[in-house]
Amino acid sequence: MRFAISTGLRRGDVIRVKWKDVDFSARRISFFERKKDRVAEVYVSPALVQDLKRLRGLKLSSYYVFPGRSEPKYGDGHLSSRAAYDVLQRNLLRAGLEGRPFHSLRATCVKLCQRRGWSESQTAKHVGDTVRVIQEHYATPSAGEMAEASSVKSLL
């Protein structure tokens, strides 16, 4: 989940990231973005790099960062889309947030970028969307954000 939130990648892209896509020294992941049919890149935090290094140590023989079953009948070796969804749902259930879609992790990434003061263009580049998409789909403040804004930035 931390990987998906930190990168803002779509579920189909998360499960297909290969170790050869990860450049630890540049803190960058270059991957094939299926929805847009292009190679994209995302820069990651030092903390996520450390997480990936630990994970790499556990899965030296795996081609994928998130491997699935190795039997040929289960596909090409990466975690299945359904398995990724199931992992998310188990974690959300533990947190009392069940029923959220995987895409909510992407929205969380955008919200965190906004809260950290990233510009719309930086946020859009990070998640591989346009500024317009960020404005239309992710710029709507939540009830909590409105409550905080009204208490911190009083109108009168």
Image (spheres, rainbow, N blue to C red):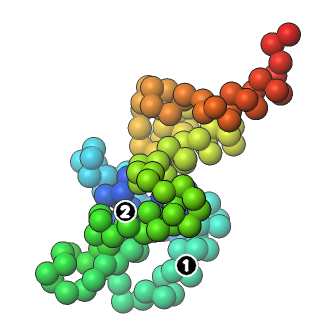
Residue 137, position as x, y percentages in the image = 45, 31
Residue 68, by quadrant, is: bottom left
Residue 41, position as x, y percentages in the image = 43, 53
**Where 51 sits versus 128, above or below?**
below
Task: Judge by depth and name the residue closer to the eye, 99 or 139.
Answer: 99
Residue 47, position as x, y percentages in the image = 65, 67
Q: Taking the image as drawn, is residue 28 in sight?
A: no
Task: Judge by depth and name the residue closer to the eye, 82 or 50.
Answer: 82
**Where 78 sits versus 128, above or below?**
below
Number of residues whose C-alpha sits closer than 10 Å to that of mark 1, classed few (under 14), some (14–19) or many (20 or more)? few
Q: Residue at x 36, y 57 (%)?
A: 11
Number of residues whose C-alpha sits closer than 10 Å to that of mark 2, classed few (under 14), some (14–19) or many (20 or more)? some
Q: Please tell me whether mark 1 or mark 2 is closer to you in this view.
A: 2
Residue 71, position as x, y percentages in the image = 19, 87
Q: Residue furthest top?
A: 156
Give the labeled residue for mark 1: 53
Q: Is 88 placed left or right of 82 in the picture? A: right
Element assignment for label 1: helix
Q: Earlier in the sequence, mark 1 or mark 2?
A: 1
Quadrant where the C terminus lies?
top right
Q: CA distance from mark 1 to mark 2?
A: 23 Å
Q: Residue at x 47, y 68 (%)?
A: 90
Give the labeled residue for mark 2: 85
Going by the numbered disc 1, the residue's amino acid type is Lys
Q: Is 150 placed left or right of 64 in the picture? A: right
Going by the numbered disc 2, the residue's amino acid type is Tyr
Task: Judge by depth and name the residue closer to the eye, 21 or 73.
Answer: 73
Q: Residue at x 69, y 42 (%)?
A: 116
Element assignment for label 2: helix
Q: Taking the image as drawn, is residue 78 in sight?
A: yes
User: Do the residues under discs 1 and 2 have CB atoms within 8 angstroms?
Assistant: no
**Where 101 sits versus 1, above or below?**
above
